[in-house]
Amino acid sequence: MMNAQAEHGANRERSGHARRLANPAAAGLSWTVFAVWQAIRCAICAVLVLGEPVLRAVLVPVAFQGILVTVIFGFLIGDPRFPRCGMLAFSVGAQVLYWLYLGLMGVYLDKCGDATHSTIAYPVLQPVSRKTRHADNSSYGSSI
């Protein structure tokens, strides 16, 4: 019974392998489409990352200053002609637009992976133990 199951499993593996090798053109096409998609996604990531400091420098101060002006002129001074709701909506809208941009960046950059999980991630920033740092200095002894 065990041999029959093992042979059936081996036949199934061979048939799956044969199916994958039977159409190399489809496999090549799928790899080509995957490579093109990765190139497009990488270009989109580059544009988003390069545009983020500019948007941060524009939208965040606009939102902060708009709220500050609204508090001063709309609530503290109490000018009846000051458009409180419109100014607050504009300021909150600027901040929400920046957050949406960060969310869009997160969608594309989340798939890129984190450098801290890589095996070759920033060797300069990895901690050095005291033993390896002073291995050639015999005056420290074995107490380290």
Image: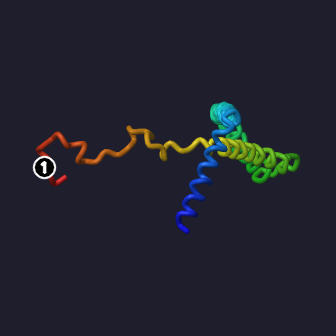
Q: Which residue is drawn at 67% across and 37% down?
A: 27
Quadrant including the N terminus: bottom right
User: Tag 1's secondary structure?
Assistant: loop
Say which residue label 1 marks: 141
Query: Splitting the image into 4 quarters, where does residue 36 fall?
Result: top right
Q: In this view, does 133 lie to the left or right of 55?
A: left
Residue at point 39% right, 39% down? 123
Three-letter amino acid code at the position of disc 1: Gly
Name above or below for residue 46 compared with residue 17. above
Image position of 5 (left or right of 84): left
Front-lying residue, 80 or 120: 120
Residue 69 screen position, x and y as percent = 74, 45
Measured as percent of width and height from the top left, residue 118 is found at 48, 43
Quadrant housing residue 23: top right
Do we see residue 57 in this rendering? no
8 vs 99, nearest the viewer: 8
Q: Is residue 87 above or below residue 28?
A: below
Few, some or many C-alpha atoms within 10 Å of disc 1 (few <14, some 14-19, many ≥20)?
few
Q: Which of 143 and 25 is in front in this view?
A: 25
Res. 1 visible in picture: yes
Residue that sits furthest to the bottom in the current view: 1
Q: Which colour scheme is used?
A: rainbow
Residue 29 falls in image quadrant: top right
Residue 51 at x, y = what percent? Answer: 67, 32
Residue 5 location (% of width, % of height)? 57, 63
Give the total of numbered labels.
1
Q: What residue sits 75% from the left and 53% below the top? A: 76
Q: Residue at x 70, y 36 (%)?
A: 26
Of all residues, the one furthest to the right in this rendering is 81
